[in-house]
Image (cartoon, rainbow, N blue to C red):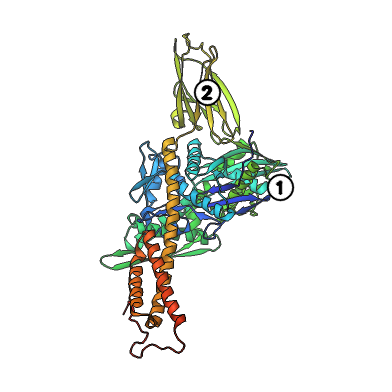
């Protein structure tokens, strides 16, 4: 596919369910970009405060317990999904925040009384990653490669692109996470290898089989489950804790949002501990209260064996996609040279054991499962900037594409795992005499029945010349570009009449809504900057206030009476504005306090040597707190 090298840096973003990571290629090498707190990954958490702040990452996670209803996590699991889908309904049962239905039936979230689409929440995270990259690189960043699970459908991919657009990023390419991991592993290697990427992240599972040969990365097959990941493993521990606590105390914690948030954090910590220890202690004091007997505490030990028993069926759900990916690639387990583990959940020993059984070999542990996807995305970014040459990526579509035909059946036109970009066509005919138009219903999926697949849209070809049924020849063609964006056309072969539709599945947001959200995101970026300036000024004011109070208490006796009165009034006023959210007022009192501090400093330096405070006035001036 022809392309023109872009100017400026192209960052690679792994927009994960649990954590995000951003990387960049500079001088031919890739590096992870740290966030503003110095971390190499950023929690995919957004907290909405009652003051209108939008907290992202670790700072949002820290306040989640006290603000559970307004702290959104794992929003990637909702992206591109309908509210009534089984996956969303399962999520509603366990989320401490509200999942609501949008006007078009999509799953949105509600925080601080306002509904947000998943792309909006994702965009807030992307904005923070973009800002971190700009701070690190010292220049504006507008171009990005964003990764998605290989098994994401077109709706979910388009929603991810919309999130990037809202965040002010031009998304040069959407690439699959396992493919990005393979790029990171294979970049610079010239030997021929067949690679299986087992990617179990926070919310999704993918497996891809690739062939790597002299800089050419060809995806042979991909399979997965877009609603299986570490969040489900956490939930099994949470359910066990709830059951054990109810058995001991008779109290059901499921209705308590605060308790659920504490349980979630404890479950995640315990799960991580069990990757390296045989037992984890979970201690949550004052988790509940009984009116009759007082406060209740939760203190339980979770053995690794018990944890593995709880999640055994989840692990087994990854086996069939692996076998299917091998079958589609026409390979056997012994044909695989390397198995790469991607995603934080793959650190669990039970996952290592599962992978060994499936592929008959030890998985490759040479890559960081939390960072490898972002690194691979940045390598793809290097292709766009011209830093990486002789690298060819041949990806595939994860699900078949086709149309609905007579009887409500699904006719596949482009089979799953077809290499993209691709163009394929089939010829159809009319089903009734003198049919003047045909409706083309575009679908994506693997079910034989049309309604069992995902509808991507409909369009109509009109003006077909009158003829008996079966005579008109209507060619329906699908063209899929390297981003997975689909264009469908229907052409009457006898007249050349053609109608086409570019399938850009809606993320629940119209182009106008996306434009409004971009403007809102820019406004929020400015308000965030102003909030930061205000907090810095308030911090300076607080520090200067304490120092000036001390100096005034010790040296105020050196000032003239009118100066003492001025300083007193300034100290009183400055103390009162510490909680005011108006930057102009805070700045005014900061300037006034700096002037008062200077008056005291001048008096100290100008005082004659040996001067002492009057004996009756120890310290010379009554303090505000006295």
Q: Position of residue 120 (x, y in %)?
A: 43, 45
Q: Position of residue 319 (x, y in %)?
A: 55, 45
Q: Position of residue 50 (x, y in %)?
A: 35, 56
- In this view, the residue farthest toward the bottom is 615
229 left or right of 298 in image:
right
Question: Which quarter of the figure is the C terminus placed in?
Answer: bottom left
Cα separation between marks 2 and 1: 40 Å
Q: Give the mark nearer the N terminus: 2 vs 1.
A: 1
Q: Residue at x 53, y 18 (%)?
A: 491
Q: Nearer the viewer, residue 135 or 300?
A: 135
Q: Tell me the residue that label 2 is attached to.
A: 489
- Give above or below for 407 relative to 237: above
257 left or right of 24 in image:
left
Q: Position of residue 186 (x, y in %)?
A: 68, 47
Q: Tell me the residue that label 1 is attached to.
A: 188
Q: Nearer the viewer, residue 303 or 64?
A: 64
Residue contact at pointers 2 and 1, CB within 8 angstroms: no
């Amino acid at each position: 596919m022809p392309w023109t090298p872009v100017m400026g840096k192209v960052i690679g973003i792994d927009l994960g369910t649990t954590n995000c990571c951003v990387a960049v290629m500079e001088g031919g090498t890739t590096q992870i970009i740290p966030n503003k707190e110095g971390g190499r990954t950023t929690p995919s958490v957004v907290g909405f405060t009652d003051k209108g702040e939008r907290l992202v990452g670790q700072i949002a996670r820290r306040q989640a317990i006290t603000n559970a209803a307004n702290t959104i996590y794992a929003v990637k699991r909702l992206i591109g999904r309908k509210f009534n889908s089984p996956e969303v309904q399962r999520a509603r049962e366990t989320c401490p925040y509200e999942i609501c239905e949008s006007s078009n039936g999509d799953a949105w979230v509600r925080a601080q009384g306002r509904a947000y689409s998943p792309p909006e929440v994702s965009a807030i995270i992307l904005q923070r990653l973009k800002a971190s990259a700009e701070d690190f690189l010292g220049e504006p960043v507008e171009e990005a490669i964003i990764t998605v699970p290989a098994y994401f459908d077109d709706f979910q991919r388009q929603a991810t692109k919309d999130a990037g657009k809202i965040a002010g990023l031009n998304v040069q390419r959407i690439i699959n996470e396992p493919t990005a991991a393979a790029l990171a592993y294979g970049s610079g290697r010239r030997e021929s290898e067949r690679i299986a990427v087992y990617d179990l992240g926070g919310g999704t599972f993918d497996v891809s089989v690739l062939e790597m040969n002299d800089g050419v990365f060809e995806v042979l097959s991909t399979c997965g489950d877009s609603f299986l990941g570490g969040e489900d493993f956490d939930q099994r521990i949470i359910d066990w804790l709830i059951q054990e606590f109810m058995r001991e105390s008779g109290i059901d914690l499921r209705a308590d949002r605060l308790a659920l948030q504490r349980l979630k954090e404890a479950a995640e910590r315990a799960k991580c501990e069990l990757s390296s220890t045989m037992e984890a202690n979970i201690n949550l004091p004052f988790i509940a209260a009984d009116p009759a007997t007082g406060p209740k505490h939760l203190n339980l030990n979770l053995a690794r064996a018990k944890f593995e028993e709880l999640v055994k069926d989840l692990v087994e759900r990854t086996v069939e996609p692996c076998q299917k990916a091998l079958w589609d690639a026409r390979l056997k387990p012994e044909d695989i040279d390397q198995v790469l583990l991607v995603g934080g959940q793959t650190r669990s020993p039970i996952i290592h054991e599962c992978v060994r059984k499936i592929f008959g070999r030890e998985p490759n542990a040479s890559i960081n499962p939390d960072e490898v996807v972002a690194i691979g995305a940045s390598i793809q970014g290097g292709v766009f900037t011209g830093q990486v040459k002789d690298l060819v990526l041949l990806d595939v579509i994860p699900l078949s594409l086709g149309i609905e035909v007579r009887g409500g059946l699904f006719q596949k036109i482009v089979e799953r795992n077809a290499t993209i970009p691709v163009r394929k066509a089939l010829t159809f005919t009319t089903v009734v005499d003198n049919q003047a138009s045909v409706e083309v219903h575009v679908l994506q999926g693997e079910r034989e029945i049309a309604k069992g697949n995902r509808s991507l849209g409909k369009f109509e070809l009109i003006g077909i010349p009158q003829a008996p049924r079966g005579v008109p020849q209507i060619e329906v063609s699908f063209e899929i570009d390297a981003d997975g964006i689909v264009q469908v056309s229907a052409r009457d072969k006898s007249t050349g009449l053609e109608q086409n539709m570019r399938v850009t599945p809606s993320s629940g947001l119209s182009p106008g809504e996306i434009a409004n959200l971009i403007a809102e995101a820019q406004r929020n970026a400015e308000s965030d900057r102003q909030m930061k300036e205000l907090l810095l000024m308030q911090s300076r004011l607080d520090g200067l206030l304490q120092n000036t109070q001390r100096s005034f208490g010790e040296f105020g006796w050196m000032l003239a009476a009118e100066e003492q009165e001025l300083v007193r009034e300034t100290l009183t006023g400055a103390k009162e504005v510490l909680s005011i959210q108006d930057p102009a007022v805070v700045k005014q009192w900061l300037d006034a306090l700096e002037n008062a501090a200077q008056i005291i400093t001048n008096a100290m330096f100008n005082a004659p040597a040996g001067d002492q405070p009057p004996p009756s006035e120890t310290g010379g001036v009554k303090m505000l707190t006295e």
